[in-house]
Image (tube, rainbow, N blue to C red):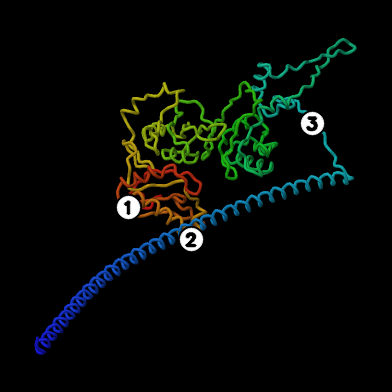
Amino acid sequence: MSDFEEFEKQLSENRQEREKERHKKRSRSESTCRADKHRSWSKDRGSRSREKRSHSREKRSRSREKRSRSREKRSRSREKRSRSREKRSRSREKRSRSREKRSRSRERKSRDRRSSSRDHKKHSHSPRRTRKKRTRKYWDVPPPGFEHITPMQYKALQAAGQIPTIALLATSTSGGLASAPTQVPIVGSQMTRQARRLYVGNIPFGVTEESMAEFFNAQMRLAGLSQAPSNPVLAVQINQDKNFAFLEFRSVDETTQAMAFDGIIFQGQSLKIRRPHDYRPLPGISEQPAFHVPGVVSTVVPDSPHKLFIGGLPNYLNDDQVKELLTSFGPLKAFNLVKDSATSLSKGYAFCEYVDISATDQAVAGLNGMQLGDKKLIVQRASVGAKNANPTSIIENPVTLQVPGLQRLQNSGLPTEVLCLLNMVMPEELVDDEDYEEILEDIREECCKYGSVRSIEIPRPVDGVEVPGCGKIFVEYVSAADCQKAMQALTGRKFANRVVVTKYYNPDQYHRHEF
């Protein structure tokens, strides 16, 4: 080969090598571009996923913050309630201490008076001259111990053998003539003592004998039952350990009339007045009082044609709540909620009698079959004396009624839009503005769970003014169905350690603020 051909051959090989290197460079650049593109796309995807994760974390943290805030609010509300309970307990303790101090001071004063009277008797050197009482010898002069009963009653006691016959012993003179007979002395005051005593139960704590005597003497005078100017109550014996007392009156008739005060309120307590266990009826003397004291509801319901039986009562209702339901038809003459002697809990039935006997049929027509909580009431005349009543007249001529707080005509438990909540708050708990707002917010939050609440009314106490409905809570719902749901859910629940009692309320009276 010539030199020229070898030169050309080398040139061609050089060209081929350059082209191969260029091709390799292009392929490398293309691969790097693709890799860069893939890397950038994967980076975008990773950044987006990171953003999503950060958003979800922020949402979780926000929800956690909300939960923590709600927990803090609940804990604050619980702390407020606990503080209010502590305040109430402290106030109760202060009251009990003040009562104890008063009772101690009264005891000291009484001891001082007794000691001073004894000292005065010891040091008195000029005794008073006592005049002898003249023995009266006229008609109808009672024997000793029987000054407060009539001659007819005394003769009846003698005929029944409860008073021993007075033995007349004739004495003879020296001339054989019989002188005036002499009487054999007998104990007369103890014969009528059992008929002049009354048992008084459920007396207030720390009450004294003087205050009880003054109270009953004043009540006897106000009712016109005192038969003489002096005090009818002679003595009072109190048993503080067992919480009862005995009253001793000056006459048997005044003792019987004082039975009319059974159920009277004394220092916030309803007194229970009964005959003592050793009482034996005296012949010719009535055992029941002939006078009814207005405003006093007796705790004993005697058997009569107008005695009512009320059954199907929820066990959590107390005496005052059942009375409030019954007094919608008229004032009560007697009422007794039957309770278990061991647990003092209601057995679910009661007996009552109205002052106006015409209210008996109205109460039967208005309350029998009424829905109260999860039970239906059974209201009818009691068995004794029910034969004289005509039950068909009640069915044929039902009485159209509007019971305050209960909208019920002939229908059974017709729901309304307004729910009345009872036994939840006391008037003294509504005085403070913070406590009032806390109670209102708590009730609103709970009642909104059962439907949309339109308005809530809680009457607050005002100094010197009797506010109607104070202590009750009224909740107005948009529909009667929501109100019915709330009644079924709230009845029987506890609010501030009190059992909640519910009833439907008349919307017209609610809007007129007739609570």
What's the residue type where badge 3 is placed? Answer: Arg
> Badge 2, how many Cα within 10 Å: few under 14, some, many 20+?
few
Q: CA distance from mark 2 to mark 1?
A: 25 Å
Q: Is residue 39 above or below residue 367?
A: below
Q: Amino acid at mark 2?
A: Glu
Q: Position of residue 37 (x, y in %)?
A: 22, 73
Residue of label 3: 134
Rounded to the nearest angstrom, the CA distance separating label 3 from label 2 is 75 Å
The circle drawn on residue 452 is 1
Q: Nearer the viewer, residue 413 or 198?
A: 413
Residue for point 46% across, 60% down: 72
Q: Residue under label 2, please give it.
A: 434
- Of the numbered discs 2 and 1, the one sitting upstream in the chain is 2
Nearer-N-terminus badge (1/3): 3
Q: Secondary structure at mark 3?
A: loop
Per the image, label 1 sits on a secondary structure element best described as loop
User: Quick check: 165 left or right of 280?
Assistant: right
Which disc, if any, is residue 296? none
- The quarter of the displayed image where residue 232 is located: top right
Earlier in the chain: of badge 3 and badge 2, it is: 3
Answer left or right for 168 relative to 195.
right
